[in-house]
Image (cartoon, rainbow, N blue to C red):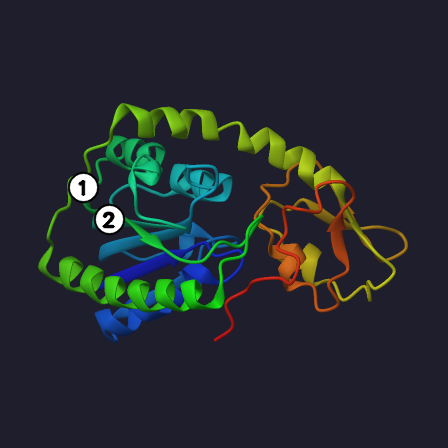
Amino acid sequence: MYTIIYFSPTGNTYHLAKKLKSNLGENTELFRMEFLDVDILEKNDHLILMFPIHGFNAPRTVKRFVKNLPENLYKSISILAVGCNEIWVNDAVSLYVNKVLKYKNYSIVLDEVLAMPLTFIMAFPDETNKQLFDKADLRIFEMAQKIKSRTITKRVVSFKSKLLTFVGKAESPAARMFGLELHATKNCTSCSICWNNCPEYNIKENKNHKPKFGFKCSMCMRCIYDCPTRAITPYISKFIPIKNGYKVLD
């Protein structure tokens, strides 16, 4: 009945996707977006796309997936974006996704933003993180009820929100430069986790069996936070990853 496809570099969106699956019931499929072959997808009643917000936009990985999504697979689609707040600054994050899906004749049921802790630059206090987790869990229950009842949400997007989304597109080229800064320290054990899990295929194994970073980085932080020895770090922009790390573990 329902299909959830999520992109979750550091775990926040995956946490919520599992909660949503539990609330929607056993007739719900759950797929990780990156590396997913769309040819294996079967027709279903409703698709829920879930992804983090990157620079007031959907991540590059998500945009590529939506462009490749076949027509007529689902009767309707919901979009749940995950950011650090639910205020106006994130109102326009799904504009591109909406445009592509509507061009493919999909009807949109939900278009919502859920708040979870930040995973870069600034760490929230533990108390704030817990409040966000608790509120997000309640919101996921609310989203499940709306999806079941096919309650359509119509988002009114202000000009200032659209402007932020336009300006936020500058993050993509900045992310590519950030990728060129990344390197592995002597703590690297050549475990292969980073190059096997990069959603943009930006990491290759070099002749010394260490990661080599290219120009396709989307600054999703997965390689940094997934590294078991915390060996991956930028040369200059060391303020971007949270010093003590942040990752949902459940």
Q: Quadrant of residue 173?
A: top right
Q: Nearer the viewer, residue 79 or 67?
A: 79
Q: Residues within 10 Å of mark 1 (few under 14, many from 20)?
A: some
- Residue 107 is tagged as 1
Front position in the image: 105 or 187: 187
Residue 63 falls in image quadrant: top left
What's the residue type where badge 1 is placed?
Ser
All told, the count of numbered labels is: 2
Distance between the Cα atoms at labels 2 and 1? 6 Å
Image side of residue 208 versus residue 59, left or right: right
**Label 1 SS:** loop
Can residue 17 be seen by looking at this rendering? no
Q: Residue at x 61, y 37 (%)?
A: 175
Which residue extends farthest right?
208
Q: In the image, 183: left or right of 201?
A: right
Label 2 crowd (10 A; few <14 / some 14-19 / many >=20): many
Query: Which one is in front, 151 or 133?
Result: 133
Q: Is residue 93 above or below residue 36?
A: above
| Image quarter of the N terminus | bottom left
Q: Which amino acid type is marked by label 2?
A: Ile
Residue 174 x/y as whole percent: 62, 32
Do the residues bearing badges 2 and 1 touch, measured as CB atoms within 8 Å? yes
Residue 62 seen:
yes
Residue identifier under label 2? 77
Of the image marks 2 and 1, the number of the one nearer the N terminus? 2
